[in-house]
Amino acid sequence: MAERSKRIRGVAVARGGTRVSHRLFVDDCVIFGRALMAEWQRIHRLLEMYGKASGQMLNLQKSTIFFSSNTPTAVRRQIQREAGVPVCGNYEKYLGLPAMIGRSRYNTFREVKERVCARLNNWKNLFLSQAGKEILLKAVIQAIPTYSMSVFMLPRRICKEISSLMARFWWGHKEKDNKIQWRSWDKLGDSKRDGGLGFRDLECFNQAMLENAHLPFFDGCRDYEGEIF
């Protein structure tokens, strides 16, 4: 009701797109709003009404406020003093996923590629058969980006770089090995019935996961219209 009456505005998911006022995760709730004293007071009144109606009170010791970088210092101090909760200086992740995505989507999700690279580096000195490498690539490496892909559309560059890392590992054991790729990775992604090995096309898999979950290609919370908290 507060949203429909525009007493609280939330934050736009994309420029000109749907505005989000809150997100629920298990037993946590993230509330979005403009960094204005009037808006904080409205949100605070709504929380008090909910507490009186449900008996579930806000735990100030477990609550924090996050301000965007363009929020004036005076406004931050005023809202923090009124709210009585600490300011969170770093709100990059929640449940292992980025809470906000900046201008560079590649830098946001680069950690996924780095995790793949670190795991492959640990296997370089192992003497593995082709069957062993196939199992590790399918069961471990392809599973690393799955969690992120279930919520976000990863940049195409990240998917291509992960595929390139897997291809180099497949065609050579060690760093100094001559990694001649006798067949393209796309061909190895074909089913075994068609002469491939069934490795995933990461871009197609990412899109399929989002479509099956009936989720939009969520880009995270972007701060287009000023301050959020």
Image (cartoon, rainbow, N blue to C red):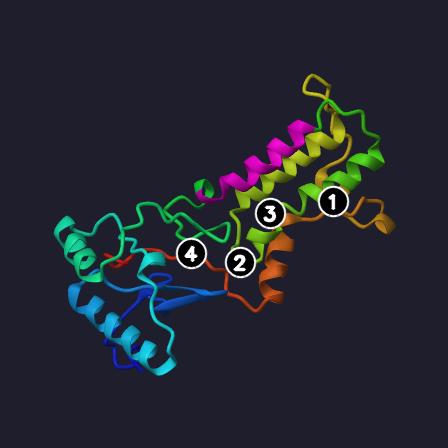
Q: Which residue is drawn at 22% across and 66% down?
A: 40
Q: Residue at x 15, y 49 (%)?
A: 73
Q: Residues within 10 Å of mark 4 (few under 14, many from 20)?
A: some
Q: Name the residue under label 3.
A: 145
Instruction: Choose the circle earlier in sequence order: 2 or 4.
Output: 2
Q: Do the residues labelled 1 and 3 touch (CB within 8 Å)?
A: no
Q: Which residue is drawn at 14% across and 57% down?
A: 78
Q: Are marks 1 and 2 in contact (CB under 8 Å)?
A: no
Label for residue 147? none
Q: How crowded is mark 3: few (under 14 residues within 10 Å), some or many (20 or more)?
A: many
Q: How far apart are marks 1 and 3 (CA)?
A: 12 Å
Instruction: Choose the circle earlier in sequence order: 1 or 3.
Output: 1
Q: Mark 2 points at which residue?
A: 151
Position of residue 199 relative to residue 207, above or below, is above
Name the spot of residue 155 as percent of width and height, x first: 51, 47
Label 4's element?
A: loop
The magenta stretch is 108-122
The amino acid sitting under disc 1 is: Lys
Name the spot of residue 15 as percent of width and height, x first: 33, 61
Q: In which quarter of the image is residue 2?
A: bottom left
Q: Which residue is drawn at 56% across and 38% down?
A: 113
Residue 7 among magenta residues: no
View extreme (top): residue? 176
Residue 111 among magenta residues: yes
Q: Name the residue under label 1.
A: 138
Label for residue 220? 4
The amino acid sitting under disc 3 is: Pro
Q: Residues within 10 Å of mark 2 (few under 14, many from 20)?
A: some
Label 2's element?
A: loop
